[in-house]
Image: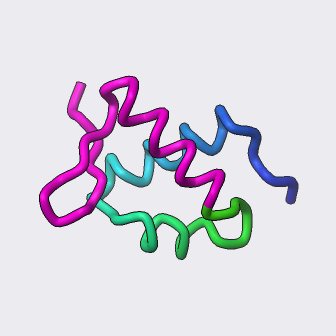
Amino acid sequence: MTAPNEEQLTDIIFALLLEKPLNLKEVHLVLSGIASEDKIRRALSNLVENGLVITGPDGRYRAVPA
């Protein structure tokens, strides 16, 4: 299996967050075999900047319902 590119990783993370809110460590735990923490952090940052994900007061990322 090859590592996902940035766009694929962003899509994977968004799909995970649609299922349930997760913090950075939880996302990294799920994706530890296919993406580094830096790439996950960048993808989360892009999702937040694009308004697709918000950060809750508990530090968990939540997908914004369409």
Q: Is residue 26 above or below residue 56?
A: below
Name the foreground residue: 59 vs 4: 59
For residue 15, side relative to residue 52 (left or right): right
Q: Is residue 58 above or below residue 49?
A: below
Q: Residue 29: horizontal and vertical position, in percent?
A: 53, 75
Q: Is residue 66 above or below residue 42?
A: above
**Residue 48 inside the magenta-drawn segment:** yes
Q: Residue 6: horizontal and vertical position, in percent?
A: 69, 38
Task: Say which residue appears at 54% left-offset and 42% top-offset.
Answer: 43
Task: Say which residue appears at 36% left-offset and 51% top-offset.
Answer: 17
Q: Which residues are magenta?
A: 38-66
In which image quadrant can residue 42 be found? top right
How many labels were placed on the picture?
0
Q: Residue 13: horizontal and vertical position, in percent?
A: 49, 49
The structure's colour scheme is: rainbow
Task: Say which residue appears at 53% left-offset and 52% top-offset.
Answer: 41
Name the foreground residue: 65 vs 52: 52
Task: Say which residue appears at 33% left-offset and 63% top-offset.
Answer: 22
